């Protein structure tokens, strides 16, 4: 026989006052008992638990947070949630935090003005237990404002002094991409960089990947030609525009390294429109191993973006759940790997063996 629907509905609306009345204790004792605090006598706690079970009472997370000073919420500050990298990191963060009973509050800052307004009003104080900053371009003042909250803070992609971080070796990833082209026999290697619409909102990773490009060329004895470096706005269209600029420039490269895969895919689009076959006339390589890289047969240096978010969330949980074990100088550097596909080959009329005979 099923339970009385009216009684079941009433039970779901039970409050802490109902539990207190049934157990014969104060509401404060109910709160302490259900949160497992040691100040409550075992027999009293059992009486409260029995009353809560009978009334199907569930502790409100908000009420528990007010009593404990914890919100069970984490703020994730992200510059561009619509971009693949950031949305994938957020997915990794959310998967881990959700399993541990934390809510994620997303703060999307799409430019320098939004960022500055956010830090001017600083809406995080007393609303969250911790903060994850995802590759945010921050000034020293912004970083100090975050640290002044005096709650656990972890960064993804943009290391902050004294703050745990997760990321990849951006310089080494770029060197891997360029070294692959060099080993194929390319010397005229272009570089496509992404530039923000607002110059105050640049990313550290962009600077590091450009440095890796230049270091790889220099180490191979190839001069860095400024005419082979172009910048386009972020995204596919930016990559296409930058590739078109390279094609119309005074020096035509035989290969192109794009700062990240979306730029590289845009470059492939421009090459197709120009009637230049890839890789026969132009090799292209990127960084990320974007979910569309396989569709476009793009050679790319892969990074595990989802795991960066998950690892950052685990670092934050460690700081939240076991503060004594928290290490402020923890920096997790995840590995990258070259994924060979169909957009790279030796330049026309030249074999890889010829390059090796020259010591390349």
Image (cartoon, helix red, strand yellow):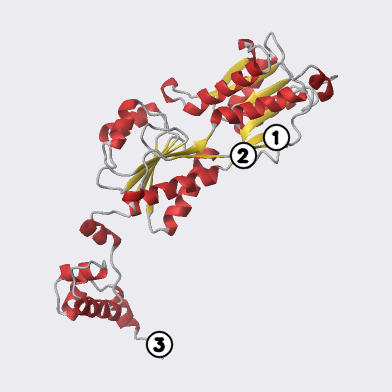
Image quarter (top left, top right, bottom left or bottom right) of the C terminus? top right
Gap between marks 2 and 1 measured at Cα:
9 Å
Give the CA distance from mark 3 to mark 1: 60 Å
Q: In this image, 198 relative to 162: left or right?
A: right
Q: Quadrant of residue 189?
A: top right
**Residue drawn at the location 20% of the way across and 71% of the way down:** 30
Up-down: is 160 above or below 360?
below
| Residue carrying label 1 | 298
Horizontal and vertical percent position of residue 37:
23, 66
Q: For residue 115, which quarter of the picture?
A: top left
The outermost residue toward the bottom is 1
From the image, tell me which residue sits under label 3. Answer: 2
Q: Is residue 70 above or below residue 24?
A: above
x and y, in percent, of residue 137 in the image: 42, 29
Compared with 207, 24 (above or below) is below
Horizontal arrangement in the rendering, residue 153 relative to residue 148 (left or right): right
Closer mark to the observer between disc 3 and disc 2 = 2
On the question of residue 269 being in view, the answer is: no
- Residue 290, numbered circle: 2
Mark 2 element type: loop
Q: Residue at x 68, y 25 (%)?
A: 179
How many C-alpha atoms fall within 10 Å of the one at disc 2: few (<14), some, or many (≥20)?
many
**Is residue 345 in view from this perspective?**
yes
Q: Which mark is residue 25?
A: none
Q: Are marks 2 and 1 in contact (CB under 8 Å)?
A: yes
Question: At numbered mark 1, what does the secondary structure look like: helix, strand or loop?
Answer: loop
């Amino acid at each position: 026989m099923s339970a009385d629907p009216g009684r079941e509905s009433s039970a779901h609306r039970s409050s802490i006052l109902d539990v207190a009345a049934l157990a014969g204790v104060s509401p404060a004792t109910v709160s302490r008992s259900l949160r497992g605090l040691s100040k409550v006598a075992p027999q009293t706690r059992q009486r409260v638990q029995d009353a809560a079970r009978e009334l199907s009472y569930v502790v409100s997370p908000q009420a528990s947070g007010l009593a404990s000073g914890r919100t069970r919420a984490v703020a994730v500050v992200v510059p561009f949630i619509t971009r693949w990298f950031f949305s994938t990191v957020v997915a990794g963060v959310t998967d881990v935090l959700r399993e541990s009973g934390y809510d994620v509050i997303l703060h999307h800052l799409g430019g320098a003005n939004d960022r500055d307004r956010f830090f001017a009003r600083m809406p995080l104080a007393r609303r969250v237990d911790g903060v994850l900053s995802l590759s945010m371009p921050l000034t020293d003042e912004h970083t100090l404002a975050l640290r002044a909250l005096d709650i656990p803070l972890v960064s993804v992609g943009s290391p902050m002094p004294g703050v745990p971080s997760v990321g990849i070796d951006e310089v080494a990833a770029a060197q891997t991409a360029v070294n692959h082209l060099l080993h194929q026999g390319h010397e005229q290697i272009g570089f496509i960089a992404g530039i923000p619409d607002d110059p105050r909102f640049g990313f550290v990773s962009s600077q590091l990947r450009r440095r890796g490009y230049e270091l790889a060329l220099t180490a191979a004895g190839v001069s860095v030609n400024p005419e082979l470096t172009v910048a386009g706005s972020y995204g596919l269209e930016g990559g296409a525009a930058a590739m078109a600029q390279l094609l119309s420039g005074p020096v035509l490269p035989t290969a192109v390294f794009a700062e990240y895969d979306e730029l590289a895919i845009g470059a492939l689009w421009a090459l197709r429109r120009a009637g230049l076959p890839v890789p026969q006339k132009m090799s292209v390589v990127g960084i990320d191993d974007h979910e569309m890289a396989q569709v476009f047969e793009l050679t790319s240096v892969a990074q595990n973006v989802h795991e960066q978010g998950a690892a950052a969330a685990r670092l934050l949980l460690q700081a939240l759940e076991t503060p004594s074990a928290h290490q402020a100088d923890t920096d997790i550097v995840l590995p990258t790997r070259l994924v060979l596909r169909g957009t790279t080959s030796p330049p026309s009329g030249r074999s890889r063996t010829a390059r090796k005979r020259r010591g390349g």
